[in-house]
Amino acid sequence: MRAMVLHTPRQPLELRHLPTPEPGPGQVLIKVSACAVCRTDLHVVDGELTEPKLPLVIGHEIVGTVAAHGPGSEGDTLRLGDRVGVPWLGYTCGRCRYCLSGRENLCDQARFTGYQIDGGYAEYTVADHRFCFPLPQGYPDVQAAPLLCGGLIGYRSLVMASTNPDLGEAGGRLGVYGFGAAAHIVAQVARHRGHRLFAVTRPGDLEAQQFARSLGAEWAGGADENPPEPLDAAIIFAPAGELVPAALRALAKGGVLVCGGIHMSAIPSFPYDILWGERVIRSVANLTRQDGTEFLALAPQVPVRTEVRLYPLEAANEALADLREGRLQGAAVLTMDPDVPTGRETSA
Ligand SMILES: [Zn+2]
Ligand SMILES: [Zn+2]
């Protein structure tokens, strides 16, 4: 099978022809159709996440069909040909205090797709059948892929932001810092819930600001500007630590600030008075399968539409570069269909 393989961090992925992987006990073999590109992939490739298995097939927003069962998983609920999604969370122990309290996202033994487990930048992958999601109908494969991380993490971040009851009041005010793949999905869910939406982008990124307005932001500006009124909650998706004090300053009393990324540059020190007033800063780590079930049921009701730019598998390095340089609106998605021209944009 064709696969784009990371051999050494900070080096480009290399196209390799590998044997099709064999599903082990409890696993299924999945014929990959599409895999979205996540900022976490960049953090792995750029060496900011420091413990990848090597060599590694990255990618954790995988859509494909079940092609074979490993020993012992014939009796599971998946059938040959079923369409499934494979997310970042690839394994949990089921026994630790986190797993036993509904917080498997924090499991001490967790293993992650496209990091400790080979992922979806390849024609085939294997996954633990218990961590595969059925996908809602009505989403073509390339449109469904960004739901699996941008969508899920965005949803979990929004749930955490909602711990401030003021956000749930009519016209609760949500700020989103960094308007990429996750933000463009969470924006739609936030508007569906009746929140007022404020978007903060890189200074001068008028295209991203226009994109945010098209998805219901009533105000969109650069990180060098201030939202026009205090926010009840804010979510930071951009990996820039200097946004933390800026977003804190934008919060009303009792406001919640959620850091939705897995990696962020150092946060500058800030005066206590911008945290005072029971403002909260928290991170969101990974996802639970419950998040996935809830979000994938919600997405078609909103309905969430995903804007994607397609790349053939071999153009994975180009897709990563476009994400790194902020040249994308919405999500980059790799397709295993070799006839798709690089850069075709589609929304559904
Ligand atoms: Zn556990
Ligand atoms: Zn991700």
Image (cartoon, grey):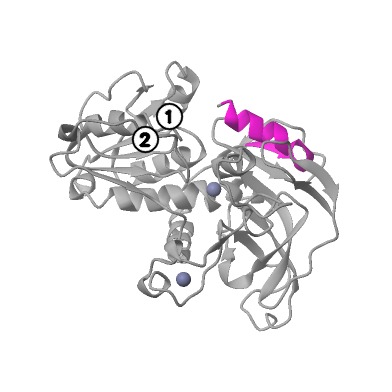
Where's residue 102, x and y in %?
38, 69
Vertical arrangement, residue 267 with respect to residue 20, above or below:
above
For the record, the magenta segment spans 309-325
Q: Is mark 1 within 8 Å of ligand 2?
A: no
When asked about the image quadrant of residue 223, the answer is top left
Name the foreground residue: 42 vs 233. 42
Where's residue 23, x and y in %?
74, 71
Vertical arrangement, residue 86 with respect to residue 283, above or below:
below
Q: Main secondary structure of the magenta part?
A: helix
SS assignment at label 2: strand
Looking at the image, residue 277 sits to the left or right of residue 30; the answer is: left
When asked about the image quadrant of residue 9, the answer is top right
**Residue 316 colored in magenta in the image:** yes
User: Could you tell me if residue 336 is visible in this image?
Assistant: no
Looking at the image, residue 126 sits to the left or right of residue 93; the answer is: right
Q: Residue at x 69, y 83 (%)?
A: 72
Q: Which residue is mark 2?
A: 176
**Total number of numbered discs in the rendering:** 2
Where's residue 269, x and y in %?
29, 31
